[in-house]
Image (cartoon, grey):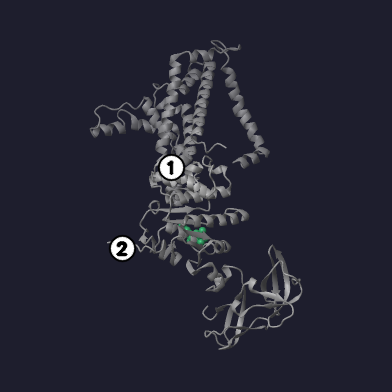
Amino acid sequence: MTLAAPENGSALELRALRKAFNGSTVLNEISISAGHGEFVSLVGPSGCGKTTTLNIIAGFEHPDSGDVLIGGRSIVRTPSYRRELGMVFQSHALFPHLTVFDNVGFGLAMRRMPKAEINRRVGAALEIVRLSGFETRYPRELSGGQQQRVGIARALTVQPRVILMDEPLSSLDAKLRREMQVELRRIQRSVGVTAIYVTHDQEEALTLSDRIVLMNKGVIEQAGTPDAIYSRPASEFVAGFIGEATFLDGTVIEAGPNGVSLRLPGGCMITLPADRRFSAGDTLRLAVRPDRVRLDRQAAGGLDTQVLARAFVGPFVRYVLGLADGTELAAQMPAGAEDLPQEGETVIARIKACDWLVFDRRGS
Amino acid sequence: MARLSELLGRSVLCLPITVLIGVFFVVPMAMVLSLAFRPYDAHALVGTEFTLRNFTRFIGDPNYVAAFARTVYISAATTVLSVLLGYPVALHLHRVKSGFARLWLTLIVLLPLMISLVVASFAWMLLLGNNGVINANLIRLGLISQPIELMNTMTGVIIVGTFSSLSYPILTIFAALENIPADLGRSARIHGASDAQVFAKVLLPLSLPGVISGGLIVFALNMAAFVIPFLIGGGRVHVVPLMIYQFTLQLFDWPGAAALGVLLFALTLGCTALAASLAQRRMPWESA
Ligand SMILES: Nc1ncnc2c1ncn2[C@@H]1O[C@H](COP(=O)(O)OP(=O)(O)O)[C@@H](O)[C@H]1O
Ligand SMILES: [Mg+2]
């Protein structure tokens, strides 16, 4: 007996995947679901299990337990070649002995599709990746960026139910990588294919994704939209991994209905919105994004700091500020702003109460 | 590879080896070459004047032409058989994951190269003879009533040649397979290729360079093979190296032997170049 898959269910669903290599757990209860046409990134430090997760979806590895569903149907027992997936590899993995045309049409030829249909689909895919006219070239005659476009076209021609990408851009140089990010997003949108994208580059994940799944040591730290993960990180790890942040320890002086007063290193006081979890004497882990730190000279009510270093980085000027006890705080100002503080100057760092990210320390 | 040869090219290390090759290879070869253009002289053995007669007498004689054809045929058959038999072994070796098993398998593959051809041929005589292990068992099983002639036949020479050459294609094909990035197989599979298709469309074409180089080694070795045709052929399988032996040590016709050697070398080189260029044409992705 089979249950009909719900029409508007997930395109891909991972249920409690576990995987261990030689007794060491690499994936621990990984559950992810991706809606139709959604672009989901798996992000995390090297070795956290991203590739293993992708390999299980692809069928190159088998989970110790858990399930993989595509369109509502379990595929863990389906061999890779019948899973109807497309995949883009970091190494490009183009067939060196086949022309661009035959590379792109590979999946269709394997399915013994009629010549005319192959011609049509390969032509369409090459048009999407803007490589029309390159049909008769061999991979080694293409640049790295072009090779990766061929890789994308090859994955698209099979009209996959999900397209898997394992750090597809990390072998390209920085400028080309940014161009290709835009390209990838455009292609994925225009085709409407569900994409699972693996990267260790948090910036890339923020740029590309509808949703980010942040992994660490085989577990999911947080899953959510780029905005949610960036502005409301669930843990200290997430705040440190996605975007930049300065971490500080604060001691709760007073906690009441009007707010929580904390003392920061160096003696500055701040007040955060009321929170019942905290009481006087607690030590809290705090974080603040550099772009949420405003610098000015006159007004009181912020943190007294000294500019330790500043660096011009294109559209921004980065600051390293020192609190009274030497604790460092990163800040960022638009490069065009007037009267930017100089090195050695004393400035007030102003941070809105709602811009502090607060992590309860007691648990960990 | 290019860098290595560049490095060696500049290095003084290559000076001794150049001298060594010069003295012990180029000089004797040049002497053989010059011998081939001298007449045979019954008294002095080697005459002094220049002649092409050594070549014309072989090229014009159907017996000698047949011997050359036989040599090429035996070598080609041996090559094809050893590549066909060696490929599955190489593929298996490639698929073995455990390093320990690989080491042992590699040693087993290398074994034929460690045993003297004379000893190996003797062992094969015990197998192939009319009363040998193979015929005796076939008769006992009732599959044949008369023994199959294997000793003193081309078939026997090809069989033994194949097994003694098998190591080369196994090693070159194994190396070619190991050089294929694992991602290519995965990428083929995920895009719809079954195991058989992955093999036919990706592994096989990409391992062709290993097939070609292994095949060429086997061909060249068997064109020049002496021990196996001598012992297994028992004097009835006339191949060119056997004739060179006769000319040198029985007839003392050194110019004739030299001319046969030059012709054999030219033929080997020609066949090899032809095969390599045909292969090159079949692999347009390889040419730069
Ligand atoms: N085939 C394997 N055998 C043993 N360990 C493996 C294997 N594949 C991956 N691992 C281990 O699993 C962990 C996760 O690897 P991986 O999924 O490749 O991480 P990521 O892609 O996030 O960098 C790593 O510690 C890695 O060493
Ligand atoms: Mg990885």
Q: Amino acid at mark 2?
A: Leu
Q: Residue furthest left?
A: B142
Q: Residues within 10 Å of mark 1 (few under 14, many from 20)?
A: some
Q: Position of residue A281 (x, y in %)?
A: 58, 87
Label 1–label 2 contact, CB within 8 A: no
As drawn, B65 above or below A94 = above
Q: Is residue B189 above or below residue A194?
A: above
Dividing the image into 4 quarters, which one contains the N terminus of chain B?
A: top right
Residue A288 showing in the rendered view: yes
Measured Cα–Cα span from mark 1 to mark 2: 38 Å
**Residue, x 56% and y 17% (percent of image)?**
B36
Same subunit, labels 1 and 2: the answer reads: no
In what element is the residue under mark 2?
loop
The answer to whether any part of residue B182 appears in the image is: no
Q: Position of residue B224 (x, y in %)?
A: 48, 27
Per the image, the residue denoted by label 2 is A3
Q: Nearer the viewer, residue B44 or B214?
A: B214
Respond yes or no on whether mark 2 lies under 8 Å from ligand 1.
no
Residue A17: where, in percent of width, then height? 41, 65
Identify which residue, B179 or A120, lies in the foreground.
Answer: A120
* Amino acid under disc 1: Lys
